[in-house]
Image: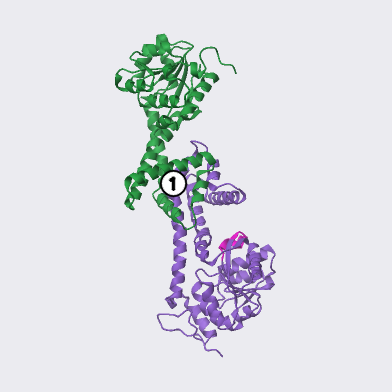
Chain colours: A purple, B green
Amino acid sequence: MSVGFIGAGQLAFALARGFTAAGVLAAHKITASSPDTDLPTVSGLRKMGVNFTVSNKDTVKSSDVLFLAVKPPIIPFILEEVGPDIEARHIVVSCAAGVTISSIEKKLSTFCPTPKVIRCMTNTPVIVREGATVYATGTHADVEDGKLLEQLMASVGFCTEVEEDLIDAVTGLSGSGPAYAFTALDALADGGVKMGLPRRLAVRLGAQALLGAAKMLLESEQHPSQLKDNVCSPGGATIHALHFLESGGFRSLLINAVEASCIRTRELQHLADQEKISPAAIKKTLLDKVKLESPSLSVASASKVSLFTNKSKKN
Amino acid sequence: GAWPRVAMEASELWVGFVGAGRMAGGLVRGLLQAGKVPASNILASAPSDKNLDAWRGLGCRTTHCNLEVVHRSTLVFLATKPHILPGVLEEIRPAVGSHHIVVSLVAGITIQTLQRLLPPWTKVLRIMPNLPCVVQAGAMVFSRGSNAGDEEAALLKSLLSSCGLCEEVPESYIDIHTGLSGSGVAYVYLFAEALAEGAVKMGMPGALANRIAAQTLLGAAKMLLETGEHPAKLRGDVCTPGGTTIYALHQLEKGALRATVMDAVEAATNRACDMAKD
């Protein structure tokens, strides 16, 4: 099996690194493409032994499983560009937050009557094979196609199938989740430093504490609150600390964060559906390069780009 | 083990109360409800008839003489106000013998103080009940003094389990119990009031809202006690994804309810400690 990545940024790099480290895929069976060769991840991919090209079409041709690893506003341009090369055999996996299966199927159906589309939401720790991934299968993707993706993604962490309408919530929780953790770790380290620890040690210990706690929870049948209780000796240090967390509304802040991320994801999707994203939201160099390679693409107006209207003439 | 010959059988037990106020009244009602001790075996003393009328109404005997209570009882509950107690102890001291079991309900008076003011052979225990003892759903903790042994502890526990939960603890937990459960009952009343008020705001009549609020608390508490599950697990069981409960809980978390409740327990406990020192 060969895997391709349209886009050679953080996500492609993280997945490629994860797959090769897990041994499910040899690097030379992976192709990644991007018009921008200056990305730091590009050299990283090359060093891994991944085939890098500036041609998205080449990636499509040499892949069975095709990951769309570009930012959500770029997706429609990519679909326009590579649509003609998509065949029934391809499994197109979109990792773009807020981009629906139906929008992708609609776009591709002008080129291929039954495109296999799977929508996936993963997160950056796939890079260390501790990712959290969910996927939802599209109209023409079979059970085996889903299972194939699941096998791939399970090699880099936890992976399970969900109904598509839950994916925005997953984005809010585990998609953005690592950022919440990094923020918490930074602050915990500050706490350690305040109380006299050297920074490096504080970071190391903080990270290990969260890693250990997460591992305990995953391997335990117990409720997290029970595990918390087990750490809190009566009148001890921990319960004093927890009281501070509660006073600050720690729990509600986390609930707020997950909610905000989920709602924003839906907003962005809604904006995309309404075709209101401005070209400024898309990196200019990328847009120019995409236009160069796909002269059939047109921009509706200077201030507005129609994302999901098919403007190319079918030959 | 075998009981000592001196009236340890509950039905043969002569029980006395020095002080006949609210807390004592709660305990005696619990005792009587459970049928552990006949009312005629109970003698209570108080300075005025104000409280004693109710005791006579229950079938208990009454007196204005504290010494009489001590003379005629084996198990003596001290239930006066804290500032009254030292004077009362001085008064009854001559009549206290090694057969007596003295149980103090008096808030803030330590076992050390009790033992200092009573004869050195006295079997002393200290108990902190809470108001729902009246309806046999109390929460009580007790500690023993130096001369109180397993039999005294077992007797007290067996008598008072009829009033609710009754556990022996180290004396240092008693102030915490005050903060958690003694005063805690008031926190629950506050919460019940607020629940009902929310319902009234949303259009439900107050009386109905009050009854439903109370039943909700009762039911939730019953499930906690009977399932033995962690409250967080029971909470999770009620929260359907994206449903009403999780939306409401989010509001409670935003209000830092947990921390506020912890603050309350802490404040009451600290106050109990401070008052004991006075």
Q: Residue at x 42, y 42 (%)?
A: B215
Whether residue A215 is visible: yes
The chain letter under disc 1 is: A
Name the kind of residue labelled 1 in the image. Glu
Q: Residue at x 46, y 10 (%)?
A: B97
Span highlighted in magenta in the image: A121-131
Residue A127 belongs to magenta span: yes
Residue A214 shown left or right of residue B251 in the figure:
right
How busy is the neighbourhood of tag 1: few (under 14 within 10 Å), some, or many (20 plus)?
Answer: many
Could you tell me residue A141's position as x and y percent?
61, 73
Q: Quadrant of the N terminus of chain A?
A: bottom right
Residue A7 quadrant:
bottom right
Is residue A252 or residue B239 the one in the foreground? B239
Could you tell me residue B3's position as x and y percent?
56, 16
Could you tell me residue B123's position as x and y percent?
48, 16
Residue A272 belongs to magenta span: no
Question: Is A24 located above or below residue B204 in the figure?
Answer: below
Question: Is B263 located above or below residue A131 in the figure?
Answer: above
Which residue, as the protein is rendered here, is positioned at the far top?
A: B94
Secondary structure beneath label 1: helix
Q: Quadrant of the C terminus of chain A?
A: bottom right
Question: Is B68 located above or below residue B153 in the figure?
Answer: above
Give the residue number, with chain letter if any, for mark 1.
A246
Q: How many marks?
A: 1
